[in-house]
Amino acid sequence: QVQLVESGGGLVQAGGSLRLSCAASGRTFSSYAMGWFRQAPGKERKFVAAISWSGGSTYYADSVKGRFTISRDNAKNTVYLQMNSLKPEDTAVYYCAKAPHGWGAVVDITTSGTYDYWGQGTQVTVSS
């Protein structure tokens, strides 16, 4: 069983920054890819970013590329999402998720159904 707990969300003005953290339980955290997704009110959950088991590979949604950075610290069982130059359209509940494998094809890692464990989410609100 894996538990994921997100933190770091909050209210920020447009142009500001936030860093989300996702702490994972379990000794095999370092074996699996991790992803971040977000869901705005009334909209579907969408892919944001993913990172491979080693941190050597990352992938981003076009909407956040160049502004967000995903990273991980396997010694701390934690994955991060650094969000810079935030925009009002980034407002959403952000979820971290664990993949059942170390990495995969783009169609695989960007699909929410691929992931087998999810956190409870953390709210990010960007004011204009």
Image (spheres, grey):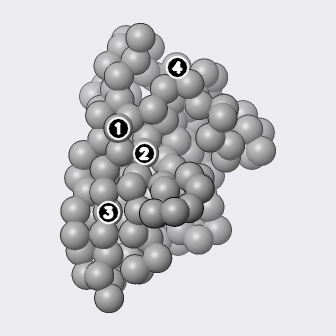
Q: Nearer the viewer, mark 1 or mark 4?
A: 1
The x, y position of residue 128, in whole percent, is: 32, 88
Residue identifier under label 4: 31
Mark 4 and mark 3: Cα distance apart in space:
28 Å
Instruction: Please name the amino acid that badge 4 sits on.
Output: Ser
Would you identify the image quadrant in which residue 23 lies? top left
Residue identifier under label 2: 95
Instruction: Please name the amino acid that badge 2 sits on.
Output: Tyr
Going from N to C along the chain, the mark reached first, 2 or 1, is 2
Is label 2 in contact with label 1 (beta carbons under 8 Å)?
A: yes
The x, y position of residue 108, in whole percent, is: 73, 38
Going from N to C along the chain, the mark reached first, 2 or 3, is 2
Residue identifier under label 1: 120
In the picture shown, does residue 92 fall above or below 13? Answer: above
Q: Residue at x 40, y 80 (%)?
A: 88
Left or right of 102: which side holds 106?
right
Instruction: Please name the amino acid that badge 3 sits on.
Output: Val
The x, y position of residue 122, in whole percent, is: 31, 50
Going from N to C along the chain, the mark reached first, 4 or 3, is 4
**Visible in this render: residue 53?**
no
Q: Dot 2: within a 10 Å radius of its alpha carbon, few (fewer than 14), some, or many (20 or more) residues?
A: many
Mark 2 and mark 1: Cα distance apart in space:
7 Å
Left or right of 116: which side holds 87?
left
Q: What numbered label is drawn on residue 124?
A: 3
Q: Residue at x 59, y 71 (%)?
A: 63
Give 38 or 64, whichever is nearer the viewer.
Answer: 38
